[in-house]
Amino acid sequence: MKVLFVDSCMKKDEESRTKILCNSFLQDLKQAKPDCEIETVVLKEEDLKPYDIDMVNARYGIVADKDWDHPMLRYAKQFSEADRIVIGAPYWDLAFPALLKIYIEHIFVGGLNFEATAEGLKGLSKVEKAVFIQTAGGYVGETDPGTEYLKYVLKTLGVKEFVRVSADFIDVVGANVEEKLAEAKQTLKQIAMNW
């Protein structure tokens, strides 16, 4: 099983509570499935740029030639080769950091991860399951616009199962941060065991 971890955590690793949860999940996953291969893309370390019209036009030519190994499609190809996806991102401005949206622009490649049909878009990715790990200083609730967007994008790309685990209210005065993180870790451990 090939697992792609899309690290959208913005703080340094030791300061990022989202990264703490992601690392805990990946460690549990490795224990539950020792043969799984985990590949990580750290978005803040990548030279990701939003698509402009020149990039879109260049991509049209690359896709028309089915040049899936072209450097411009490296994120899309990496995504297409994964069996499972882990996305870690903090809750920012009702969604997630902008770098994650830019990453999505890079993986949303027609002919590789989806195709247009008479019935609409059809996912081509072989990803079976995705987990979105999130932390928030305040209240998020059962869902939020960013989660709904991610769920829709991944479904469009062919991902069959999506789950979000969020530890929120962790910056509220008096919050027991360790308890909230422990609860999220326990939920993630159960997911890892059955993933």
Image (spheres, rainbow, N blue to C red):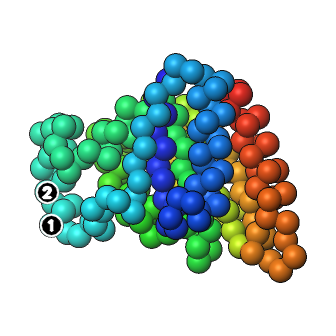
Please give left or right for residue 59 compared with residue 81 in the image: left
Looking at the image, the residue that sits furthest to the top is: 35
Specify whether residue 151 is in view: no
Disc assigned to residue 6? none
* Marks 2,1: beta carbons within 8 A: yes
**Which of 109 and 86 lies nearest the eye of the viewer?**
86
Q: Position of residue 130 (x, y in %)?
A: 58, 41
Please give left or right for residue 147 compared with residue 121 in the image: right
The quadrant holding residue 89 is: bottom right
Q: Position of residue 121 (x, y in %)?
A: 43, 45
Give the residue displayed 59% in from the left and 77% down from the top. Answer: 93
- Secondary structure of the residue carrying numbered label 2: helix
Please give left or right for residue 68 compared with residue 157 in the image: left
Looking at the image, the residue that sits furthest to the front is: 14
The residue indicated by pointer 2 is 58
Q: CA distance from mark 2 to mark 1?
A: 6 Å
Q: Position of residue 143 (x, y in %)?
A: 72, 61
The residue indicated by pointer 1 is 54
Q: Amino acid at mark 2?
A: Ala
**Which of 136 and 123 lies nearest the eye of the viewer?**
136
